[in-house]
Amino acid sequence: MKHNIRYAAGSDVGRRREQNEDSGYASGRLLVVADGMGGHAAGELASSAAIAVMRELDATLPETGSDLEAALEGAVHEAARRLVELAEIDPARRGMGTTVTAMLWDGYRFALAHLGDSRGYLLRDGALYQMTKDHTLVQSMVDEGRITEDQAAVHPRRSMVLRVLGSEGRAEPDMALREAEPDDRYLLCSDGLTTVLGPEVLHEVLTTVVDPAAAVQRLIDLANEGGSPDNVTVIVADVVAPGAGDVAVYRVGAGI
Ligand code: CA
């Protein structure tokens, strides 16, 4: 049976930054978080350029009959081309980049595209799973057995990202196609959330705060109260039966 998603999205500049370099997009079939990097406002430009391409994908993709993975991967490659163009216009933008974590939904399954250190989680049957793997130095060190997850969380180079959508034009996203189930709850977020809140806290909020908009707001508040030095962007989406009503649209905060 075809299902809908009910979602909420929010983005907050946080308490220590002056600009929000995160961008996000959420609709009834596409959820995206992008966390930009680069000086002179280039980070903001990079993440918003990636989101603009995703918005175009949502506007032009036919309702049915599309290859979700191919469509989403194609949009990531198009976003990389845009960043190259933008960097050619102004050399100060060279080296800018953005994470992209995106889910494209057809009512039955999601295609997932991922580059960088934003994250996607799935809450299913009460258990929280991290669907994405960080493209960071510390994650590669954990994979090689050189440090533990706990050491990675406090490592001085923990923010070093190895793979993003960048102005060099390379774009090699991790791609996956995942079956969705009724009552699944998905979380997409920038690292401003996960550097402060561990999986136990995410699980606690996602299992106790039923309304997606309230869950988004609660997570942002907890990140800020926890001393997040960064912008925070959060999307929460629930898979609901079509009879449960129309897709609800919530927007929290100003960055989305
Ligand atoms: Ca960030």
Image (cartoon, helix red, strand yellow):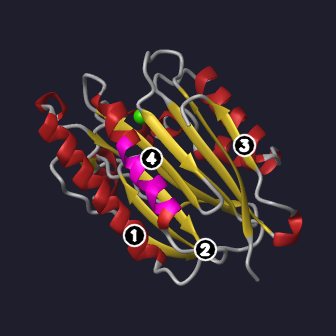
**Amino acid under disc 4:** Ser
Q: Position of residue 48 (x, y in %)?
A: 40, 40
Q: Which residue is label 2 attached to?
A: 106
Secondary structure beneath dot 3 equals strand
Q: Nearer the viewer, mark 3 or mark 1?
A: 3
Q: CA distance from mark 2 to mark 3?
A: 20 Å
Q: Nearer the viewer, residue 223 or 188?
A: 188
Q: Quadrant of the N terminus?
A: bottom right
- Which residue is denoted by mark 3 in the rendering? 250
Magenta region: 49-59
Residue 137 locus on image (x, y percent): 27, 46
Query: In the image, what residue type sits under mark 2?
Result: Asp
State how far apart marks 1 and 2 are (Cα). 16 Å
Mark 3 to mark 1: distance in Å?
Answer: 27 Å
Q: Which residue is mark 1?
A: 175
Q: Which residue is mark 4?
A: 118
Label 3 is placed on what type of residue? Tyr
How many C-alpha atoms fall within 10 Å of the one at disc 2: few (<14), some, or many (≥20)? many
